[in-house]
Amino acid sequence: MNTSIMNASKMLLLMTLSSLFLMACGPGKTVDPPAIGSSSSHTPMSSTPVATKETPVRIHSFSANQSTATKINLGGSILIDYTDTSVTDIDSVSIGNIEFQVGLLENGQGYNIGAKVEVLSPPQFPVERAINLTELGASVDISAFDVCGEIFVDIVVYSGPVENTSKYRSVEKVTFIKDPDVYCKEPESSSSSVEAPKIEMESYQATLTTSKTSGHVAISFETGQVFTYSELATGKDLIDAVLVWENGFGVLKSARTAYGYTALTGGRDTKFGEEYNANDNYSGSNVPPPVYADVFTYKSVEMTEVDNLSFGTYYVVQTADYNSETQKGFFAFMIAAEQKGRNDLQVILTVYKVK
């Protein structure tokens, strides 16, 4: 399936681009190695784009990167190599067009799938020198197509002199796995399984500051208790995280890795993870009740610090007490408010914990 990026004078471009990304998993779940999705309902692709023997265009770091739970962005750059002496008309070459061929890959065969990519800033062809794919603002909703498995994206860049801007072709490929266990899992029959009980959560708010002289700098997520800088030593066995001022920014760190706060040396090992579902649907507002643990989705919980403490952003937390079955030690929090000074930061956290 081929779709050309149209002239910028036309309205917002939609390119045919498939995508994928590893969807977040719910609390206590991990993503297993994916199986290949089914191609039975998709049409085989009739041809594969091939680069011309000579081409002055270089495609660098072509990629598709996750930005939210349902959205990925295309990245990479397209450059004309004006030093390529094998191209006789190199001085008059420009980029004339870009096309994408996207599909499901099974046993070496490509299959058409349905997806649309919105390009916020399409280039006006012909283009001299370079195109930054990230700056095009291309994105795709991966929930828009139902196929799972190994997905490939071919990018084809046409170039040439003004009288023939499709004289040369450059081709690059990138492949990804869309996990069937996450996106295409068959619902279990009610007669053969019993649905696990949902784990309900409650919320509270806590205020933290980076100031060592006033306010509270640390928190126990389980109890909601907050601690001043002078209370770090006595609260070491309870403290999960501490807010520190570092390189001009506030950073929420695991108590164990809050270097410079010697009173917490060897403290509790807390891990953070990027949250997807709540960020997509409730950013800047509370999750409406009743709140259950599976509303918070994530891919992994491995970070020892969080440095993007912007208003409305959600994160998940696993403390040293984390239990994947009971969800004890699992938390989520949103930045409900932030106030940044010249040398400090104060934030209000809305924290969700298991009842």
Image: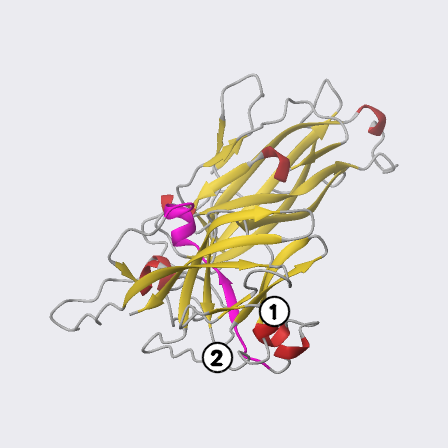
> In terms of image quadrants, where is residue 189?
bottom left
Residue at 53% x, 59% y is: 208
**Which quarter of the figure is the C terminus placed in?**
bottom left
Say whether residue 43 is magenta. no
In this view, the residue in front, 135 or 240, is: 240
- 187 lies above or below 236: above
Drawn side of residue 11 relative to residue 345, left or right: left
For residue 182, above or below residue 166:
below
Residue density around tag 1, few if under 14, some if 14–19, many if 20 or more, within 10 Å = some
Q: Amino acid at mark 2?
A: Ala
Q: Position of residue 59 (x, y in %)?
A: 70, 43
Measuring 81% from the left and 23% from the top, which residue is drawn there?
A: 92
The disc, 1 or 2, on the residue closer to the chain's N-terminal end is: 1
Work out whether residue 55 can be spotted.
Answer: no
Q: CA distance from mark 1 to mark 2?
A: 21 Å
Q: Which residue is mark 2?
A: 320
Q: Which image quadrant is residue 37 in?
A: bottom left
Three-letter amino acid code of the residue under disc 1: Tyr
Asked which quadrant contains residue 258, the reply is bottom right
Circle nearer the viewer, 1 or 2? 1
Q: Are marks 1 and 2 in contact (CB under 8 Å)?
A: no
Residue 220 - label: none
Secondary structure found at label 2:
loop
Residue 17 position, x and y percent, is 49, 41
Residue at image point 69% right, 51% down? 343
Residue named by callout 1: 229
Which of these two is toward me, 101 or 291?
291
Query: In the shown orientation, is residue 260 left or right of residue 27?
Result: right
Which residue range is magenta in the image? 267-285
